[in-house]
Image (tube, rainbow, N blue to C red):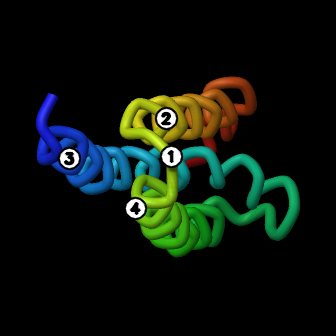
């Protein structure tokens, strides 16, 4: 494997994995913000959308901080699946 292949994998994972973690973070924060901050579903969606940028940029930076490219793919996949499981385990109750 050449030197450019792991770099390509990291860049690909940073762009698309960061986007996926941002979407999963947006969906996962809706039930948490409904429970912690407010009971208004419109505010919960707004809070989820704002926090999704933090998750997206954090995943982007994390992809280049990992020791190997496979660890970057593994970590972004696990993090997005854990955030999506929050959305599926604690649904908003149809109030959205």
Q: Are marks 2 and 1 in contact (CB under 8 Å)?
A: yes
Element class at badge 1: loop
Residue visible at 40% across and 34% down in the picture:
73
Quick one: label 4 or label 1, which is nearer the N terminus?
4
Q: How far is the residue under mark 2 from the one under mark 3?
A: 13 Å
Estimate how packed mark 3 is, as few (under 14), some (14 to 19) or many (20 or more) residues with alpha carbons within 10 Å: some
Q: How far is the residue under mark 4 from the one under mark 1?
A: 14 Å
For marks 4 and 2, give the one nearer the viewer: 2
Element class at badge 2: helix
Element class at badge 4: helix
Residue 29 drawn at (x, y percent): 65, 54
72 vs 48: above or below: above
Q: Is residue 91 left or right of residue 68?
A: right
Nearer to the camera, 76 or 4: 4
* Location of mark 2 (residue): 71
Element class at badge 3: helix
Q: How far is the residue under mark 3 from the one under mark 1?
A: 16 Å
Q: Is residue 64 left or right of residue 13?
A: right
Q: Residue 88 is drawn in which quadrant?
A: top right
* Location of mark 4 (residue): 60
53 vs 9: above or below: below
* Location of mark 1 (residue): 67
Estimate how packed mark 4 is, as few (under 14), some (14 to 19) or many (20 or more) residues with alpha carbons within 10 Å: many
Q: How far is the residue under mark 4 from the one under mark 3?
A: 10 Å
Residue 92 drawn at (x, y percent): 67, 40
* Location of mark 3 (residue): 12
Residue visible at 64% across and 59% down in the picture:
41
Q: How far is the residue under mark 4 from the one under mark 2?
A: 13 Å
Quick one: label 4 or label 3, which is nearer the N terminus?
3
- The quadrant of the picture occupied by the N terminus is top left
Quick one: label 2 or label 3, which is nearer the N terminus?
3
């Amino acid at each position: 494997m050449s030197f450019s292949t792991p770099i390509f994998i990291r860049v690909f994972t940073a762009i698309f994995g960061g986007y996926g973690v941002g979407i999963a973070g947006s969906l996962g924060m809706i039930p948490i913000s409904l429970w912690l901050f407010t009971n208004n579903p419109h505010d919960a969606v707004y809070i989820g959308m704002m926090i999704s940028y933090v998750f997206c940029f954090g995943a982007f930076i994390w992809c280049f901080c990992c020791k190997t490219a496979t660890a970057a793919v593994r970590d972004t996949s696990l993090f997005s699946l854990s955030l999506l499981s929050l959305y599926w385990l604690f649904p908003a109750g149809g109030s959205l």
